[in-house]
Image (cartoon, rainbow, N blue to C red):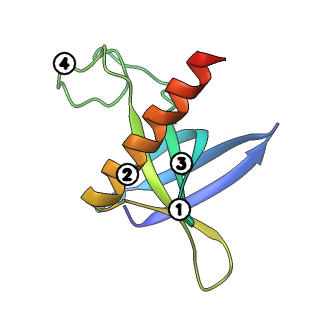
């Protein structure tokens, strides 16, 4: 995932992720999960043009019931703009624990 963009529209943050082959995938930033000094985004796929495969990926993978969700680390590039990058396995596990703690805390309220 090399090219990332973020657009503000009605307080919703849309992120465009581009893979190594130049294919663009659109995500909505659902929430920010802080872990230590770092910030991670929970991104949910936006599929406006769903095809016969149910979710619009066109992969034929049979994942029409699976939600397209990513965890991305938010970093600031040299131009001072936020970028979304793939977290390491260790970072992903830490974010997963932080998310579980947030969910557990919200259920207590």
Q: Which residue is mark 4?
A: 62
Q: SS for tag 2?
A: helix
Mark 1–mark 3 distance (CA, rounded to whole Å): 14 Å
From the top left corner, tell me how far across and down residue 101 is, in percent: 48, 35
Above or below for 68 versus 19: above
Q: How many residues crowd mark 3 within 10 Å: few (<14), some (14–19), many (20+)?
A: many
The outermost residue toward the front is: 108
Given this view, does label 3 or label 4 mark the residue nearer the observer? 3
Q: Are marks 2 and 1 in contact (CB under 8 Å)?
A: yes
Of the numbered discs 3 and 4, the one sitting upstream in the chain is 3
Q: Please tell me the numbered disc located at residue 36.
A: 1
Above or below for 82 versus 13: below
Of the numbered discs 1 and 4, the one sitting upstream in the chain is 1
Given this view, does label 1 or label 3 mark the residue nearer the observer? 1
Mark 3–mark 2 distance (CA, rounded to whole Å): 13 Å
Q: Please tell me the numbered disc located at residue 94.
A: 2
Q: Which residue is mark 3?
A: 41
Foreground residue among 22 and 45: 45
Mark 1–mark 4 distance (CA, rounded to whole Å): 37 Å
């Amino acid at each position: 995932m090399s090219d990332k963009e973020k657009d503000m529209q009605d307080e919703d943050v849309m992120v465009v992720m581009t893979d190594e082959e130049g294919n663009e995938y659109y995500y909505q930033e659902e929430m920010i999960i802080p872990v230590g000094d770092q910030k991670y985004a929970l991104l949910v796929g936006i599929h406006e043009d769903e095809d016969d495969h149910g979710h619009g990926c066109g992969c034929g993978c049979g994942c029409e019931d699976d939600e397209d969700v990513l965890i991305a680390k938010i970093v600031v590039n040299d131009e001072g703009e936020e970028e979304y990058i793939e977290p390491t396995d260790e970072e992903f596990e830490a974010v997963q624990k932080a998310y579980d703690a947030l969910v557990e805390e919200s259920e207590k309220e």
